[in-house]
Image: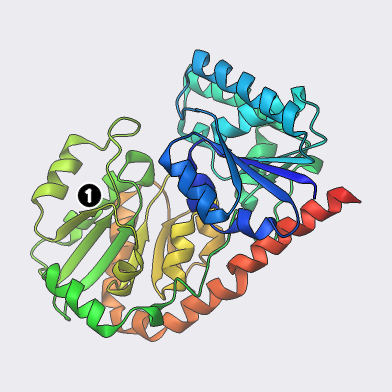
Amino acid sequence: MKKLIRITTVPISLGGLLEGQSKFMSQYFEVIGISSGGHGLERVGKQEKIRVIPVEMTRKITPFKDLKALWQLYRILKKEKPFIVHSHTPKAGTLGMLAARFAGVPHRLHTIAGLPLIEATGAKRWLLNWVERITYSCATRIYPNSAGLRNIAIENNFAKPIKLKVLGKGSSNGIDTNHFNPDSISEEQKKKLREELNLTEEDFVFVYVGRLVKDKGVNELIEAFNKFNFNKKRVKLLLVGPFEDDLDPLLPGTVEAIKTTENILYLGWQDDVRLHFAIGDCFVFPSYREGFPNVVMQAGAMGLFSIVTDINGCNEIIEDGINGKIVPPKNPEALKSAMRLCLESGDDLKKQKRVYRKIIRERYERTFVWNEILKEYKSLES
């Protein structure tokens, strides 16, 4: 079998964002996973049934550590002689594509699943643009996981259009709609969680799932919720996800509001978010930038109407007025209006849960996405 090496910066991307994909590809290639080491990478190896090799990479700009990682990757690729190197995530993309080019790997593929530079300015933006161009110039093919990302890459002259291709209808890994299925959650489970969170059947529950950071629009979400929620005891907001104070902290006032507002329930990191979707009435995700957000697909597969911002990925999964509402980013007033509209339409949203789920199943089922990627790999052999 020809060798396929997948590279991500951290193991959670290799085993979480790309869950199941390496195992599927192992039927057709000898797959090797490279990411930062530790128990997380070992777990991914066992989960995906692939050989894994640790190379320490950071998500920040760390020149000396990056050069060390680049040298390690080069040596590994020269030894393994893969047919394909496929990188995901920004740092792994830059280091992986550079190392693969230096090592003479014939097929160097990189998936764009988000561009942190979109929110950067000044010297940082210039640096990130420069790094992005290096990554794309070293790759033989680039796969934006949304049409919006492809347009951004073209507008910024990161690569020629002929080098860029969106596979299928977008997404890096699709979604397992058998797993994200409202029928997989029993009424007893929902009742138990509602009791634990002190929620009544009359409560209207907004759900946010993701990192609690500025770029996800959490400052605007809390502002919007508190503006329209005053004295409305039957409206609740569940926040599912961790704070990330070292990379992208929230405003102090937002953190204080999360801690002190009675109707905001902070639940932190959860291993399985299906139950939280299952007790929700509407998903809200006011992010500034995304690639092709899994969480929006997950919410839809669980039968939730979604409020999202008008950014790439989100505005491709959601059709305004059909399976969600699209609002401008960084606009708490528009977000508040959309949340109020959903609150007033609560009964109608419940009736359409099967419709929201059907849209996701038809467009983003995981096996469909895997086979589209496999077709691309197979085309390289000919």
Residue 135 picture quarter: top right
Q: Residue at x 26, y 84 (%)?
A: 187
Residue furthest bottom in the image: 351
Residue denoted by label 1: 223
Q: Tell me residue 347's x, y (percent).
A: 30, 84
Q: Is residue 121 left or right of residue 254?
A: right
Q: Is residue 279 left or right of residue 172?
A: left
Q: Name the foreground residue: 25 vs 62.
A: 25
Asked if 66 appears above or below 84 in the picture, the reply is above
Q: Residues within 10 Å of mark 1 (few under 14, many from 20)?
A: some
Q: Tell me residue 220's x, y (percent).
A: 29, 47
Give the structural element (helix, strand or loop) at label 1. helix
Q: Residue at x 58, y 41 (%)?
A: 52
Asked if one can make out residue 193 in the rendered structure from this viewpoint, the answer is yes
Q: Name the foreground residue: 280 vs 309.
A: 280
Q: Name the foreground residue: 180 vs 53.
A: 53
Q: Tell me residue 271's x, y (percent).
A: 33, 58
Q: How many marks?
A: 1
Q: Tell me residue 58's x, y (percent).
A: 47, 27
Asked if 88 appears above or below 233 in the picture, the reply is above
